[in-house]
Image: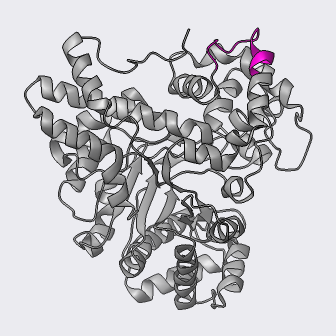
Amino acid sequence: MPLTDPDRLFPTEPRLRDLARALYEPVADLPIISPHGHCDPRWFAENARFPNPAELFVVPDHYVFRMLISQGVPPTDLGIPRADGGATETDPRKIWRRFAAHYHLFRGTPSAMWLDHSFEHVFGLDEVLSADTADAYYDHIDAKLAEDAFRPRALFDRFGIEALATTESALDDLRWHKMIRDSDWPGRVITTYRPDAVVDPEFEGFAENLDRLGELTGEDCTTWEGYLNAHRARRAIFKEMGATASDHGHPTARTEDLAPADAKALFATVRRGRCTAEEADAFRGQMLTEMARMSLEDGLTLQIHAGSHRNHSAQMFARHGRDKGFDIPRRTDWVGGLKPLLSAVGLEPGLTIIPFTLDESTYGRELAPLAGAYPALRLGPPWWFFDSFEGIRRFREATTETAGFYNTAGFNDDTRAFCSIPARHDVARRSDCAYLAQLVATGRLREADAHEVAHDLTYRLAKDAYKL
């Protein structure tokens, strides 16, 4: 029996289902544009085989291991590295067996749909993963990973990926991107400029990070002018490695547009390591506006991922570090937060700012009205907890009437789990076609227009928003 229903996510009413299927079929196999994510560029630089099923599906994917942790499975039992280098499970088969024994926890979740899609459509499996099938699964996937057809570049081509963006710190040496660029492989894997480590005064090692930024660029990062020039220099290097966007993970959507003297004074306070939490937040807000102005200079699309309480568990952060599944949604003020930035540059036609939120209540009340007015804004798709059928439906219902489709930025998968990329894009395509079918059936959209919109949501809007 197949693991995935061929009509999954389509409406159950026959006419609507037929409409959704008719809209989906022409876009199902369009190339994948993956403009924001966290895959490891080393995979494509070295093109070595993925080590084993656990390293492919469990260890890097916080969607997966956070569910098991929530049910009492220790992170070390899942091979999650410790920040102090302490002991953790290293036997991939044991990790896989624990994952398989708990697979029932994912019933009804987007993760189950992504995983089943990968198991069936990438690896040709048709039994449900469980404790009983764990070893058969492991052996089958492991044998496939030994084949050249399952190396990273081959899967990239098989998945139909036209462009894939990774995300690197401003301090990254970009060695893997350089290796990809210098190879004879034509796959387009590009970087994204993520300066949080040198923008957020509350980031661990911030002062040392600024020193490193100065060393990398030859700029004097003890001065405000030198610090801004250092960012310009690093952005230029990232552009050489293909970057078309920057990305900013801030706890709030706050922006500032301080007078030059006040910005300089705030930087001096931050640089001394004596700033308050309020001053740190103000500095992050000022830097979003500075980055927007730099985008006007160099053309990088500006992404803002705000409204996430990062690393909510202090204990988990201390033991295992960042990005371990404990980033939790929080209330976000976009109207007040973005006003200084939008007042400064929001009407600039050459600027693209893509906000992402975990506060769904802001879509209809704040973000869609803002994007429906300011030329610089394009709404990012549902993120983290909401890149799902229900999340995408709620997003479309809350934003379309105010912002339309063409003030949104298409879909991105934002994943560390490589094999989930085609699954996630398939969910987005099916979800959007189900929504469009409803508009057609209720006389709000002509069917011919719905076909064009489906194509644009799948492909063109992301290419345009990210200049790909």
Looking at the picture, how far across and down is residue 301, in whole percent?
40, 66
- Residue at image point 41% right, 87% down: 260
- Judged by its main secondary structure, the magenta piece is loop
Q: Nearer the viewer, residue 57 or 450?
A: 450
The quadrant where residue 29 appears: top left
Q: Which residue lies furthest to the right in this view?
A: 87
Asked if the stretch drawn in magenta spans residue 357, the answer is no
Looking at the picture, how far across and down is residue 199, in whole percent?
56, 70
Above-or-below relation of 305 to 173? above
Answer left or right for 357 relative to 397: right
- Residue at image point 88% right, 37% down: 88
Asked if the stretch drawn in magenta spans residue 135, the answer is yes
Above-or-below relation of 319 to 282? above
Looking at the picture, how far across and down is residue 384, in whole percent?
50, 40
| Region in magenta | 125-137
Q: Can residue 409 be seen in this view?
A: no
